Amino acid sequence: MRLAGADTERGRAVIAARGCGACHVIPGVRGATSWAGPPLTEWSRRGYLAGQHPNSPENLVAWLRDPQAMAPGSAMPNLGLTEAEARDAAAYLFTLGAGRLPEVPAGLPLGPKDAGPREEPRIRPRA
């Protein structure tokens, strides 16, 4: 997913400079290995942002600029990003998981009637 005028490498630099890795696991960003907040791996494959907003470039930019406006009480702080910084950071995050097949990882529950007729939930076998 592309954001007009945004640059993924500048986005990676913004993410590193603003210390996003102090709370998140972010692939490709040195030192971004904290589990205080949710991991941002496979970002482009996520359906929702903050559990309530569709994961779109516009919503992610708005979230990065003012998370409290979108989810009051969230632990995500306002980092004071400019519009350009937020667009660049969002562009980088949307590269994470892009182009990957939409597979369900091992260990996650199977959906109803997924891989068989049994009604009760089951766990996807590990390879």
Image (cartoon, grey):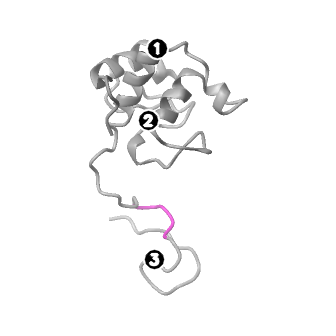
Badge 2 density bin: few <14, some 14–19, many ≥20, Cα 10 Å: some
Extreme front residue here?
4
Which residue is denoted by mark 2 in the rendering?
57
At label 1, which amino acid type do we have? Arg
Q: Residue at x 35, y 30 (%)?
A: 91
**Vertical arrangement, residue 76 with respect to residue 43, above or below:** above
The quarter of the rendered structure image containing the N terminus is: top left
How far separated are the C-alphas under marks 2 and 1? 19 Å
Secondary structure of residue under mark 2? helix
What is the magenta range?
106-110
**What is the total number of numbered labels drawn onto the structure image?**
3
Q: Nearer the viewer, mark 2 or mark 1?
A: 2
Q: Nearer the viewer, mark 2 or mark 3?
A: 2
**Vertical arrangement, residue 62 with respect to residue 112, above or below:** above
Q: Earlier in the sequence, mark 2 or mark 1?
A: 1
Q: Residue at x 41, y 24 (%)?
A: 87
- Front residue of 96/8: it is 8
Q: Position of residue 16 (x, y in %)?
A: 39, 17
Badge 3 density bin: few <14, some 14–19, many ≥20, Cα 10 Å: few
Q: Residue at x 61, y 44 (%)?
A: 51
Q: Earlier in the sequence, mark 3 or mark 1?
A: 1
